[in-house]
Image (cartoon, helix red, strand yellow):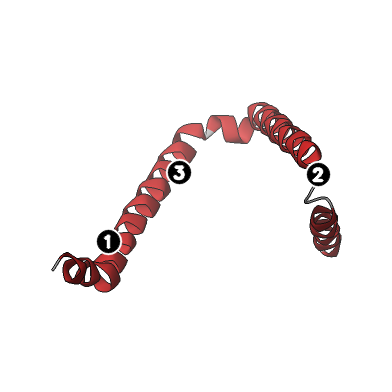
Amino acid sequence: MITVLAIMTAGIVLGIFLQKKKKLIQINDKLTMWAIYLLLFLLGISVGSNDTIMQNLDTIGVKALIITAGSLIGSILAAWFVYVKFFKNKEQLNEK
């Protein structure tokens, strides 16, 4: 964990010094996207070669769907509550 934090801190410090280098930032963005694509591809290989995951994919998929739906519904309800509690009355006052 210390290694991850040290690498991240070094990246932040380097990013501060390289803020003005727009071309370098654009190259970094593209490299980051390709690194993410590579990691996703390698994750797919790992999942596809794991017999336990492949045999239980239907169960895992249903659980993932339930968790996703619950998260989405919870986020919508929380956003609605915050809107009604903190913003709705202000908008009505601004209209008058």
88 left or right of 13? left
Say if 51 sits above or below 28 in the image. Answer: above
Looking at the figure, which quarter contains the N terminus?
A: bottom right
Say if 96 sits above or below 23 in the image. Answer: below
The percent position of residue 69, horizontal first and vertical second, equals 35, 47
| Amino acid of disc 3 | Ala
Specify few, some or many for label 2: CA neighbours under 10 Å numbering under 14, 14-19, or 20 or more: few
Residue that carries the numbered disc 2 in the rendered image: 21
The percent position of residue 84, horizontal first and vertical second, equals 23, 67
In depth, the one of 34 and 94 nearer the eye is: 94
3 left or right of 83? right
Which residue is at 24% across, 71% downward? 90
Specify few, some or many for label 1: CA neighbours under 10 Å numbering under 14, 14-19, or 20 or more: few
Q: Quadrant of residue 14?
A: bottom right
Mark 2 secondary-structure assignment: loop
Sequence-first tag of 2 and 1:
2
* Number of the label disc, if any, that sits on residue 64: 3
Q: Residue furthest front?
A: 96
* Number of the label disc, if any, that sits on residue 6: none
Residue that carries the numbered disc 1 in the rendered image: 80
The percent position of residue 71, horizontal first and vertical second, equals 39, 53
Per the model, the C-alpha gap separating discs 3 and 1 is 24 Å
| Amino acid of disc 1 | Trp
Which residue is at 40% across, 42% downward? 65
Sequence-first tag of 3 and 1:
3
Q: Quadrant of residue 75?
A: bottom left
